[in-house]
Amino acid sequence: TVALGAEAHLPFTETGVTGIVRGAILPGVSVNGLGHPDLAIALASGMEYRRGRASAAVLYSLERYRFAPSATATVERREQLAGLVVSVGWSLKR
């Protein structure tokens, strides 16, 4: 998937916790059996903790898709996916 967006890290505490907010437009989305959506966006927000080279994050992620009416579907179709994303990382450099 191709995405065009931005991400912001906001200091939450002085102990390595930051807030994360991200948003993106997904111009390259395709779905089997349907045309390309006329609107596809991805949003996420959550918290990240960093200590030394280690990091852990928990994000709530949301994706929304809107498909315009077509010859095979006479009504507008909307889809939404949401989930909790948990990630753990280790940086090779400081």
Image: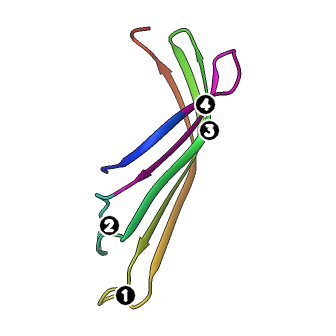
Badge 1 amino acid: Ala
Q: CA distance from mark 3 to mark 2?
A: 28 Å
- Look at the image and say whether residue 88 sits in the magenta stretch: no
Secondary structure category for the residue under label 3: strand
Q: Which callout, 3 or 2, points to the residue nearer the camera?
A: 3
Query: Pointer 2: what residue?
Result: 31
What residue is shown at x 44% (from left), y 83% (from top)?
Answer: 76
Query: Pointer 1: what residue?
Result: 73
What range of the chain is rendered magenta? 9-26
Badge 2 amino acid: Val
Q: Mostly what secondary structure, the magenta segment? A: strand
Residues packed near mark 1 inside 10 Å, few (<14), some (14 to 19) or many (20 plus): few
Residues packed near mark 4 inside 10 Å, few (<14), some (14 to 19) or many (20 plus): few
Q: CA distance from mark 4 to mark 1?
A: 43 Å
Expressed as whole percent of the image width and height from the top left, the position of residue 41 reads: 45, 58
- Specify the quadrant of the image occupied by residue 12: top right
Q: How many marks do you count on the picture?
A: 4
Q: Of 51 and 20, which appears nearest the observer? A: 20
Tell me the number on the disc at residue 46: 3
Disc 3 or 4, which lies upstream in sequence? 4
What residue is shown at x 35% (from left), y 48% (from top)?
Answer: 4
